[in-house]
Image (cartoon, grey):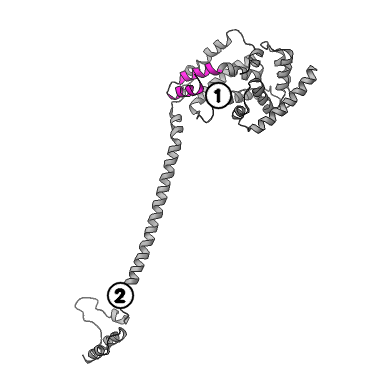
């Protein structure tokens, strides 16, 4: 079921069926999106429950001004950033020791050592640059899609990505070379 | 979604099946989302706004036209008054005020008044002479 069919199902009064379709369509993708920001399977699991409760509660007020996909991504991103802010894992400057430890000791991380360093370099970026880099590099979203999720102009996102790329390169050169 | 992430982030076996089953229970465990009313309202809201604007325009237009009609009525009555005043001959105003206030009362107009009226209204000399004789 695509986004249009999901919304038609919802509007026809079959809300639970529409919600199940959203779970089916988005749960795995959202898992990876949230996991790449938290670097913790357990935190991601907890957050997904909260995110889908939010989606269920907010769906009646979804006006269809944006795509369902970007609307869901916005909810997920905001919830995750709120969680990271509250748990103090998101330092304003650089990589927090707690986040570094999470990345180093994540038992469900299957990447190479270089990918682990890359994850650290991304986690050390300022919030906006980190989000843009994450969505562009890992999730392969277009600037237009990211701009709708983050409610920012495409030009500003391109600039953020450019700065983020420079910082990530510098960080990797220091650690890997 | 890129395979970069799914290759990098591993999950316990059967995790996503369990996750989906858990998430699908949310509607039953949490208060049902309100009915479609907000959707309906959102859909009809532009039309309601348009109808309100039209009603406002109609009301404003009606009030404006009414005012114009009142103004033109006033000017018409002024013109009518001017037209009637032209019909009244240029005469001694005292002759008007000398008219009897009730029926049966005699006119308080002297012969001299009649002659003055005839002179001012441009009557012929013969008619004035006749009036003086009478």
Q: Is residue B113 left or right of residue A67?
A: left
Label 2 neighbourhood size at 10 Å, few (<14), some (14-19), many (20+)? few
Residue A172 rendering spot, x and y as whole percentages: 76, 20
State the separation of the CA atoms marked 1 and 2.
Answer: 86 Å
Vertical arrangement, residue B83 with respect to residue A16, above or below: below
Q: Nearer the viewer, residue B61 or B36?
A: B61
The quadrant in which the C terminus of chain B is found is: bottom left
Q: Main secondary structure of the magenta part?
A: helix
Q: Residue sitting at 43 percent across and 30 percent down?
A: B40
Q: Chain of mark 1?
A: A
Vertical arrangement, residue B77 with respect to residue A61, above or below: below
Magenta-colored span: A1-26
Quarter of the view holding residue A175: top right
The quadrant in which the N terminus of chain B is found is: top right
Quarter of the view holding residue A76: top right
Q: Is residue A69 magenta?
A: no
Q: SS for tag 2?
A: helix
Give me the disc on residue B87. 2
Q: Residue sitting at 59 percent across and 29 percent down?
A: A148
Name the residue tied to disc 1.
Answer: A69
Res A98 visible: no
Q: Is residue B68 left or right of residue B130?
A: right
Vertical arrangement, residue B61 with respect to residue B40, above or below: below
Q: SS for tag 1?
A: helix
Residue A11 rendering spot, x and y as whole percentages: 44, 25
Q: Nearer the viewer, residue A119 or A145?
A: A145
Res A142 visible: yes
């Amino acid at each position: 079921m695509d986004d249009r069919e999901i919304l038609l199902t919802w509007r026809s009064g079959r809300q639970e069926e529409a919600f199940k379709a959203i779970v089916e369509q988005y749960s795995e993708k959202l898992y990876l999106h949230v996991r790449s920001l938290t670097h913790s399977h357990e935190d991601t699991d907890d957050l997904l429950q909260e995110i889908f409760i939010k989606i269920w509660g907010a769906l009646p007020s979804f006006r269809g001004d944006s795509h369902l996909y970007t609307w869901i991504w916005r909810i997920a991103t905001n919830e995750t950033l709120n969680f990271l802010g509250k748990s103090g894992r998101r330092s304003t400057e650089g990589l927090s020791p707690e986040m570094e430890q999470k990345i180093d000791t994540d038992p469900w991380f299957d990447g190479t050592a270089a990918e682990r360093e890359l994850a650290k370099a991304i986690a050390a970026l300022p919030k906006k640059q980190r989000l843009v880099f994450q969505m562009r590099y890992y999730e392969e979203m277009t600037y237009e899609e990211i701009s709708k999720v983050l409610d920012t102009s495409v030009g500003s996102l391109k600039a953020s990505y450019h700065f983020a790329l420079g910082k990530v390169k510098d960080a990797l050169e220091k650690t890997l070379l | 979604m890129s395979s970069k992430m799914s290759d990098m982030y591993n999950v316990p076996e059967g995790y996503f099946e369990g996750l989906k089953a858990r998430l699908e229970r949310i509607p039953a465990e949490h208060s049902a989302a309100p009915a479609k009313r907000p959707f309906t309202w959102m859909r009809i809201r532009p039309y309601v706004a348009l109808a309100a604007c039209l009603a406002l325009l109609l009301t404003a237009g009606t009030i404006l036209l009414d005012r114009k009609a009142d103004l033109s009525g006033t000017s018409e009555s002024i013109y009518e008054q001017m037209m009637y005043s032209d019909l009244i001959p240029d005469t001694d105003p005292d002759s008007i005020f000398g008219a009897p206030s009730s029926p049966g009362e005699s006119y308080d107009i002297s012969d001299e008044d009649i002659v003055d009226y005839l002179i001012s209204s441009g009557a012929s000399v013969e008619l004035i002479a006749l009036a003086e004789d009478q």
